[in-house]
Image (spheres, rainbow, N blue to C red):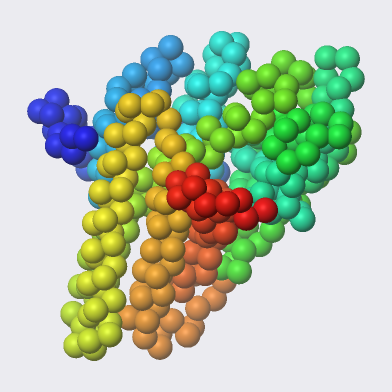
Amino acid sequence: MDIGFSPEETHFREECRDWLHANVPAETRPLDAADAIGFDKAWQRQLFDAGWAGINWPTDYGGRGLSIVQQVIWLEEYAKAHAPWIGANFVGINHGGPTLIINASEEQKAYHLPRILTGEAIWCQGFSEPGAGSDLAGIKTRGRIEGDELVVNGSKIWTSFAHVADWQELVLRTEDGSRRHSGLSWVICDMHAPGITVRPIRKMSGQIEFAQVFYDDVRIPLANVVGGLGNGWKVAMSTLSFERGTGFIADQVKQGQEIDDLIATARANGMIGDDRIAHELAQMRAEVAALRAMTYRNISEVVRTGQPGAEASLIRLFTAELGQRLDRMAVALAGPEMLDFAYGDDNAVGDYLRGFAGTIAGGSAQIQRDIIGERLLGLPRSR
């Protein structure tokens, strides 16, 4: 593994830094997805027009065709520049699009990938279900084949951005009598199709970003199946490997900035003199450095194999749990002023409350530990 950067990559980093310095929006991104959708689309379009969307996506579909290492460099500089979270574009850019690149037909890629990169089309993820959580083996939403269509009935929950999305990466059961991971299919669902009802869910931090989605005889063309009927588990694994392996790189870089900010705060208010706080800050700073090393190792794996492996679950779990500890420390250092928190506030308490979703999204912490135990450590199946 080579963790150094070539002269070309170093020059690319300088290009990223210069562009971001001149173009990062001065205004703050709204917190609610419905309020932020215009901001998210405009920023994504600006990135695309300047050639900074889809760094390592194929040039045939609007990307720049550069390496995954250059994609990581872009994300590192993006976080350092305090550029806004890509918000509603997260699913399409970070795992919907990459999944299509690997598994979709040429027709599917030609239609959807450019629209994702420009911000024209917003995607959401339809994996988790009531009663099954993020365990795909428990999926009950069904698609019945009628002619050249699937007729879909069921429900998905914890669907980020469903109420503003145009398309959904939907995993459902298409074979009668199938169980667990067999008989599943990964399909592209039009979120504006008749029969779809979206019920937004307000988070405890006050924002509306999640939703429950209901499907009542929703008709989806069989041409929207990605990777073939019955191959949904395989396609979904590539989706989740991107989500867990490379989808949160910007968050990991941001954590490095957060720990430095927390140390500065503790020094300024004198709380660094508390040995327990000093020790915890030092521990988290070391863990941020370890996480960065794990990420580079994972990227090296992507360069070799084309997509992240099961090791991505280690990074996903570590990132989420470390993020929650950073949020708790920020609240502790903030002191009694945080008692005045109200829904919608964008401060340390808001980050702390939003952070609870970190060990649920992209597969719960329990699911990640199952994967680590079974696929990396070779332990017996837990279920």
Identity of the residue drawn at 24% across and 56% down: 289
Above-or-below relation of 21 to 360: above
Identity of the residue drawn at 64% across and 22% down: 226
Q: Is residue 53 left or right of residue 136?
A: left
Q: Is residue 87 visible?
A: no
Above-or-below relation of 329 to 183: below
> Observer-nearest residue: 210 or 147?
147
Q: Is residue 240 visible?
A: yes
Identity of the residue drawn at 45% across and 50% down: 377
Q: Horizontal and vertical percent for residue 164?
A: 64, 42
Q: Horizontal and vertical percent for residue 52?
A: 33, 29
Q: Is residue 206 left or right of residue 72?
A: right
Q: Is residue 327 left or right of residue 37?
A: left
Q: Quadrant of the N terminus?
A: top left
Above-or-below relation of 280 to 306: below
Identity of the residue drawn at 32% across and 36% down: 299
Above-or-below relation of 131 to 266: above
